[in-house]
Amino acid sequence: MDLSENTWNNRYKTNDIGWDLGEVSPPLKAYFNQLENKSLKILIPGGGNSYEAEYLFHLGFKNVFVVDLSKTALENIKNRVPNFPASQLLHEDFFNVNDTFDLIIEQTFFCALNPNLREKYAVKMHELLNKKGKLVGLLFNAPLFDNRPPFGGSKKEYLAYFKPLFELVIFKNCYNSVERRNGKELFVKMVRKEKP
Protein backbone atom coordinates (compact mmCIF):
# COMPACT_ATOMS: atom_id res chain seq x y z
CA MET A 1 0.00 0.00 0.00
CA ASP A 2 1.78 3.10 -1.28
CA LEU A 3 0.52 6.30 0.34
CA SER A 4 3.47 8.45 -0.73
CA GLU A 5 3.41 12.00 -2.07
CA ASN A 6 3.73 10.67 -5.64
CA THR A 7 0.71 8.43 -5.19
CA TRP A 8 -1.47 11.30 -3.99
CA ASN A 9 -0.20 13.63 -6.73
CA ASN A 10 -1.04 11.01 -9.36
CA ARG A 11 -4.53 10.56 -7.94
CA TYR A 12 -5.22 14.29 -8.26
CA LYS A 13 -3.66 14.47 -11.72
CA THR A 14 -5.75 11.54 -13.00
CA ASN A 15 -8.87 12.67 -11.12
CA ASP A 16 -8.93 9.40 -9.12
CA ILE A 17 -10.47 11.23 -6.16
CA GLY A 18 -13.76 9.52 -5.38
CA TRP A 19 -13.83 11.07 -1.90
CA ASP A 20 -13.89 14.58 -3.40
CA LEU A 21 -17.42 16.03 -3.36
CA GLY A 22 -16.54 19.00 -5.58
CA GLU A 23 -18.04 21.28 -2.94
CA VAL A 24 -18.00 21.89 0.80
CA SER A 25 -19.73 18.99 2.57
CA PRO A 26 -23.17 19.95 3.95
CA PRO A 27 -22.42 19.10 7.63
CA LEU A 28 -19.29 21.24 7.62
CA LYS A 29 -21.01 24.03 5.72
CA ALA A 30 -23.71 24.12 8.42
CA TYR A 31 -21.02 24.19 11.12
CA PHE A 32 -19.05 26.97 9.42
CA ASN A 33 -22.17 29.08 8.94
CA GLN A 34 -22.69 29.37 12.69
CA LEU A 35 -19.08 30.30 13.54
CA GLU A 36 -18.81 33.95 14.54
CA ASN A 37 -15.14 34.51 15.39
CA LYS A 38 -13.51 35.25 12.04
CA SER A 39 -10.04 35.46 13.61
CA LEU A 40 -9.94 31.75 14.49
CA LYS A 41 -6.76 30.05 13.35
CA ILE A 42 -7.96 27.00 11.43
CA LEU A 43 -6.11 23.98 10.03
CA ILE A 44 -7.47 21.59 7.41
CA PRO A 45 -5.10 18.60 7.32
CA GLY A 46 -4.93 16.41 4.22
CA GLY A 47 -7.19 19.07 2.77
CA GLY A 48 -6.83 18.06 -0.87
CA ASN A 49 -8.87 20.37 -3.10
CA SER A 50 -10.28 21.80 0.13
CA TYR A 51 -13.59 23.36 -0.81
CA GLU A 52 -13.86 23.81 2.95
CA ALA A 53 -10.89 26.21 2.97
CA GLU A 54 -12.33 28.08 0.01
CA TYR A 55 -15.74 28.39 1.67
CA LEU A 56 -14.25 29.61 4.96
CA PHE A 57 -12.03 32.10 3.13
CA HIS A 58 -15.02 33.56 1.30
CA LEU A 59 -16.91 33.79 4.60
CA GLY A 60 -14.13 36.08 5.87
CA PHE A 61 -11.93 33.62 7.76
CA LYS A 62 -8.47 34.77 6.68
CA ASN A 63 -6.47 32.58 9.07
CA VAL A 64 -7.13 29.23 7.35
CA PHE A 65 -4.27 26.81 6.67
CA VAL A 66 -4.34 23.70 4.49
CA VAL A 67 -1.65 21.04 4.77
CA ASP A 68 -1.31 18.30 2.17
CA LEU A 69 1.34 15.94 0.78
CA SER A 70 0.05 16.61 -2.73
CA LYS A 71 1.45 19.71 -4.39
CA THR A 72 -1.10 19.20 -7.17
CA ALA A 73 -4.01 19.48 -4.73
CA LEU A 74 -2.58 22.66 -3.22
CA GLU A 75 -2.08 24.15 -6.69
CA ASN A 76 -5.74 23.36 -7.44
CA ILE A 77 -6.74 25.54 -4.47
CA LYS A 78 -4.42 28.35 -5.58
CA ASN A 79 -5.88 28.24 -9.10
CA ARG A 80 -9.47 28.28 -7.83
CA VAL A 81 -8.86 30.93 -5.16
CA PRO A 82 -5.98 33.10 -6.45
CA ASN A 83 -6.09 35.47 -3.46
CA PHE A 84 -5.76 32.63 -0.91
CA PRO A 85 -2.41 33.30 0.83
CA ALA A 86 0.24 30.96 -0.60
CA SER A 87 1.98 30.91 2.81
CA GLN A 88 -1.14 29.20 4.23
CA LEU A 89 -0.96 26.31 1.76
CA LEU A 90 1.50 23.98 3.48
CA HIS A 91 3.13 21.35 1.30
CA GLU A 92 4.30 18.93 3.98
CA ASP A 93 3.48 15.90 6.05
CA PHE A 94 0.78 16.64 8.63
CA PHE A 95 2.86 14.93 11.32
CA ASN A 96 5.63 17.51 10.76
CA VAL A 97 3.41 20.56 11.33
CA ASN A 98 4.47 22.28 14.56
CA ASP A 99 2.23 25.33 14.83
CA THR A 100 -0.92 25.54 16.99
CA PHE A 101 -4.54 26.20 16.01
CA ASP A 102 -7.90 27.08 17.52
CA LEU A 103 -9.85 24.73 15.26
CA ILE A 104 -8.91 21.72 13.14
CA ILE A 105 -11.31 20.42 10.51
CA GLU A 106 -11.43 16.70 9.72
CA GLN A 107 -12.73 15.85 6.26
CA THR A 108 -11.59 12.54 4.66
CA PHE A 109 -8.05 12.83 6.06
CA PHE A 110 -8.32 10.32 8.91
CA CYS A 111 -9.68 7.65 6.53
CA ALA A 112 -6.82 8.26 4.06
CA LEU A 113 -4.09 7.54 6.60
CA ASN A 114 -2.73 4.06 7.15
CA PRO A 115 -4.88 2.76 10.05
CA ASN A 116 -1.76 2.05 12.11
CA LEU A 117 -1.32 5.85 12.36
CA ARG A 118 -4.70 6.51 13.98
CA GLU A 119 -3.49 6.71 17.56
CA LYS A 120 -0.61 8.94 16.42
CA TYR A 121 -3.18 11.13 14.61
CA ALA A 122 -5.16 11.64 17.83
CA VAL A 123 -2.01 12.54 19.78
CA LYS A 124 -0.85 14.95 17.05
CA MET A 125 -4.26 16.64 16.95
CA HIS A 126 -4.02 17.18 20.70
CA GLU A 127 -0.53 18.71 20.26
CA LEU A 128 -1.65 21.04 17.47
CA LEU A 129 -4.63 22.52 19.29
CA ASN A 130 -4.50 25.55 21.56
CA LYS A 131 -6.10 25.50 24.99
CA LYS A 132 -9.83 24.76 24.50
CA GLY A 133 -9.09 24.12 20.82
CA LYS A 134 -11.58 22.02 18.86
CA LEU A 135 -11.34 19.13 16.42
CA VAL A 136 -14.50 19.12 14.30
CA GLY A 137 -15.51 17.11 11.29
CA LEU A 138 -16.61 13.83 9.81
CA LEU A 139 -15.42 10.26 10.34
CA PHE A 140 -16.64 7.25 8.38
CA ASN A 141 -18.68 4.86 10.52
CA ALA A 142 -18.60 1.94 8.08
CA PRO A 143 -16.23 -0.91 7.10
CA LEU A 144 -15.12 0.47 3.67
CA PHE A 145 -11.71 -0.87 2.46
CA ASP A 146 -8.98 -2.58 4.44
CA ASN A 147 -6.23 -2.55 1.77
CA ARG A 148 -6.46 1.05 0.44
CA PRO A 149 -8.08 4.38 1.30
CA PRO A 150 -10.68 5.20 2.31
CA PHE A 151 -10.16 2.99 5.33
CA GLY A 152 -13.31 2.45 7.32
CA GLY A 153 -13.84 2.07 11.02
CA SER A 154 -16.35 2.29 13.81
CA LYS A 155 -17.40 4.66 16.55
CA LYS A 156 -16.20 2.17 19.17
CA GLU A 157 -12.70 2.07 17.64
CA TYR A 158 -12.48 5.86 17.35
CA LEU A 159 -13.55 6.45 20.94
CA ALA A 160 -10.50 4.49 22.11
CA TYR A 161 -8.22 7.01 20.36
CA PHE A 162 -10.00 10.23 21.22
CA LYS A 163 -11.62 9.79 24.63
CA PRO A 164 -8.36 9.97 26.61
CA LEU A 165 -7.33 13.23 24.93
CA PHE A 166 -10.56 15.10 24.21
CA GLU A 167 -13.86 16.03 25.74
CA LEU A 168 -16.35 14.57 23.27
CA VAL A 169 -19.01 17.25 22.80
CA ILE A 170 -20.66 15.63 19.74
CA PHE A 171 -19.87 12.13 18.48
CA LYS A 172 -22.95 10.90 16.68
CA ASN A 173 -24.43 9.81 13.38
CA CYS A 174 -24.53 12.66 10.91
CA TYR A 175 -28.07 13.74 9.95
CA ASN A 176 -27.15 15.89 6.92
CA SER A 177 -24.57 13.86 4.98
CA VAL A 178 -24.52 13.91 1.19
CA GLU A 179 -26.75 11.13 -0.12
CA ARG A 180 -23.99 8.65 -1.00
CA ARG A 181 -22.56 8.91 2.53
CA ASN A 182 -25.91 8.81 4.29
CA GLY A 183 -25.75 6.54 7.37
CA LYS A 184 -21.97 6.13 7.01
CA GLU A 185 -20.67 9.26 8.73
CA LEU A 186 -20.23 10.47 12.28
CA PHE A 187 -20.19 14.19 13.00
CA VAL A 188 -17.63 14.88 15.71
CA LYS A 189 -16.86 17.92 17.80
CA MET A 190 -14.15 17.47 20.41
CA VAL A 191 -12.45 19.90 22.76
CA ARG A 192 -8.83 19.39 23.75
CA LYS A 193 -8.39 18.17 27.31
CA GLU A 194 -5.65 20.01 29.19
CA LYS A 195 -4.37 17.01 31.12
CA PRO A 196 -5.16 13.77 29.36
Image (tube, helix red, strand yellow):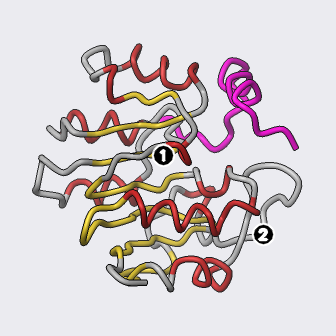
Give the magenta part as a residue range: 1-22
In front of the other: 4 or 171: 4
**Which residue is depicted at the point 60% across and 57% down?**
110
Q: Which residue is mark 2?
A: 143
Spatial CA span between label 1 and label 2: 22 Å
Q: Tell me, yes or no, whether the highlighted magenta stretch contains residue 10.
A: yes
**Residue at the image position 30 percent from the left and 48 percent from the top:** 42
Q: Is residue 156 left or right of residue 115?
A: left
Location of mark 1 (residue): 45
Instruction: Work out which quarter of the rendered image holds the C terminus and state it.
Output: bottom left
The image quadrant of residue 85 is top left
Q: Position of residue 1 (x, y in %)?
A: 88, 44
Q: Name the foreground residue: 97 vs 158.
A: 97
Q: Secondary structure at mark 1?
A: strand
Which is more foreground, mark 1 or mark 2?
1
At 86% across and 60% down in the image, what residue appears?
146
Label 1 packing within 10 angstroms: few (<14), some (14-19), many (20+): many
Residue 34 numbered tag: none
**Residue 131 spot, x, y in % from top left:** 25, 69
Q: Is residue 86 magenta?
A: no
In this rendering, the answer to whether 191 lies above or below 112 is: below
Identify the residue shown where x is 48% and y is 17%: 75
Mark sitting earlier along the chain (1/2): 1
In this rendering, is residue 50 above or below 142? above
Residue type of the residue flagged with mark 1: Pro
Q: Is label 2 in a helix, a strand or a loop?
A: loop
Give the left or right position of residue 83, taking residue 92 as reference. left
Q: Residues within 10 Å of mark 2 (few under 14, many from 20)?
A: few
